[in-house]
Image (spheres, coloured by chain):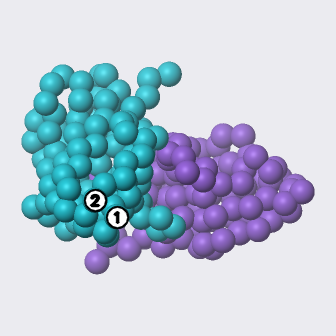
Amino acid sequence: EPEVTQTPSHQVTQMGQEVILRCVPISNHLYFYWYRQILGQKVEFLVSFYNNEISEKSEIFDDQFSVERPDGSNFTLKIRSTKLEDSAMYFCASSRVGTGNTIYFGEGSWLTVV
Amino acid sequence: ELKVEQNPLFLSMQEGKNYTIYCNYSTTSDRLYWYRQDPGKSLESLFVLLSNGAVKQEGRLMASLDTKARLSTLHITAAVHDLSATYFCALEYGNKLVFGAGTILRVKS
């Protein structure tokens, strides 16, 4: 069964460092998303991406965050200067069409900022 | 502010019993999703409910949607230990899902 894959599964970084989280969405999907989940809390939307541009973003997704689809398969989330409060599980997700379809989530990248 | 509220937040139940998790939301939407999450794992899609009155069943789980009441339910029938997990409802709003806080379900034998 096709799945969304994410790397790394776990990353520890120093505060202020840049981090890139990588995702390979399901191959025929057109909509891509990043969500995050701080330990013990609910899942929060960060950004949605379609047709090579951001279609919606949350208040969390400030200037420190960016997304890119550098080639036909990868979808990345960059955090320019990490803060302690960025420590969370980051989930990539994809769907074939934007609404009313199952959104498939990857296994997550656990980011620890120290 | 859009709110998606689940209750209960924690549910401990005996094997073989039935129970319902409730998901209330504060705005008009026709689409509601249920996900399961095991500890340290990703979100597994359970149901996508696309219209008022939608009912879907898979095994011991049944989900329904009442858009007029802005309420979705996830009913568990004859619970088994393998159903222990955290269950999230998520409302589709624009190009995103807005998640509830999750219900931690523990099924005791």
Q: How many marks?
A: 2
Identified at 80% across, 51% down, the residue is B81
Q: Which chain is purple?
A: B
Badge 1 is on which residue? A114
Q: Quadrant of the C terminus of chain B?
A: bottom right
List x then y, in percent, for residue B18.
79, 60
Labels 1 & 2 near each other (Cβ < 8 A): yes
Helix, strand or loop at mark 2: loop
Between the C-alphas of marks 1 and 2, the distance is 5 Å
Q: Answer left or right for A74 relative to B100.
A: left
Q: Which chain is cyan?
A: A
Q: Residue A23: give its label.
A: none
Identified at 31% across, 35% down, the residue is A23
- What's the amino acid at mark 1? Val
List x then y, in percent, for residue B106.
74, 61
Q: Answer left or right for A4 relative to B53.
A: left
Badge 2 is on which residue? A14
Q: Nearer the viewer, residue B67 or B88?
A: B88
Identified at 69% across, 62% down, the residue is B105
Q: Answer left or right for B37 relative to A91.
A: right
Q: Nearer the viewer, residue A34 or A21?
A: A21
- Dividing the picture into quarters, in which one does residue A50 lie? top left
Q: Earlier in the sequence, mark 1 or mark 2?
A: 2
